[in-house]
Image: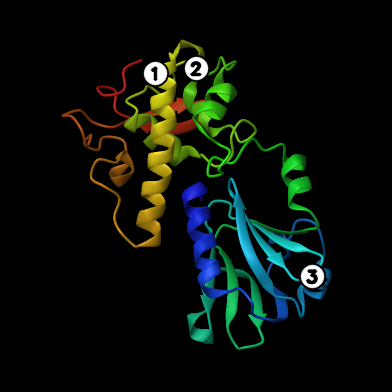
Amino acid sequence: MPELPEVLHFKHYVESTSLNQSIGKAEILSDKVISNTTAEDFSKFLKGQTFKSASNYGKYLFLHSTGDRDLVMHFGMTGQPVYFKNEHKQPDYARAIFHFENGFKLAFNCARMLGKLELIEDKKAFIQNKELGPDISSDYFDEETFLELVNSRRGMIKSSLMDQNLMAGIGNECSDEILFQARMHPKKKVNELNEDELRNLYDKIDMVVKTKLDCLDHDKELPDSFILKDRNEGADCPDCDGTIAKITVGGRSGYFCPQCQHK
């Protein structure tokens, strides 16, 4: 599932391709991706408008329009924006296409149709309604904020990192990488961690997000030191002679190195 690094990458992609172009038509190819209005109203609201800017919050991408509605993209498991012009370049799983009057198009491509498009009037109200915690890419998400957020937690650290109501943006893959880089067991209880361990964890959150985003933006492979390079059961650990194991935490499958990440 696209997590914060992917959403930030999509933001940069949209900013470099799709802003300040008048929308001639918003074509909905599958009503299943529309969450709060009809396809007809969706197109009516956006026709003649432009996307003037983009922003993110956690796993959500916001395209701010010149009209009275902004577009929210949530990418589900397989969603992504695709900018193209010629019909033979149209992605295979386009569920909505925004036709710009200059002939270019922006598609919401989503193979498994788990992503959603929504028109909203107010970003702050949307975030409050979703009860999202602080976005981990925001300027106000600093080390002290992180320590305050986890101070009263008693659950397992992997589950806490993935709790969007606690902090927004970290999903299953990033939590595995963050914990591997911190050499921390996924089932370690948060209240068992000392302040130094928590501060180190905060540093790894920042490092993993920035490293993954840089690789996405510049079409580079992840570092060999990342578990995500080969995140599979039985794969070689990138730091020791052990192998990667599969684990279930809070009903979600994850991966870790039992030799590097002791409980």
Secondary structure of residue under mark 1: helix
Q: Which residue is drawn at 39% across and 18% down?
A: 196
Q: Mark 2 points at which residue?
A: 190
Query: Which disc, if any, is residue 92?
Result: none
Distance between the alpha carbons at the discs numbered 3 and 1: 48 Å
* Residue type indicated by callout 2: Val
Badge 1 density bin: few <14, some 14–19, many ≥20, Cα 10 Å? few
* Residue type indicated by callout 1: Asp
Secondary structure of residue under mark 2: helix
Is residue 1 something one can see in this rendering?
A: no
Q: Do the residues labelled 2 and 1 touch (CB within 8 Å)?
A: no
Query: Which disc, if any, is residue 196?
Result: 1
**Residue 212, percent from left and from top:** 38, 49
**Residue 245, percent from left and from top:** 32, 29
Quadrant of image for the C terminus: top left
Is residue 164 something one can see in this rendering?
A: yes
The residue sitting at the top extreme is: 192
The residue sitting at the left extreme is: 241
Q: Name the residue under label 3.
A: 67
* Residue type indicated by callout 3: Gly
Q: Which residue is drawn at 62% across and 37% down?
A: 134
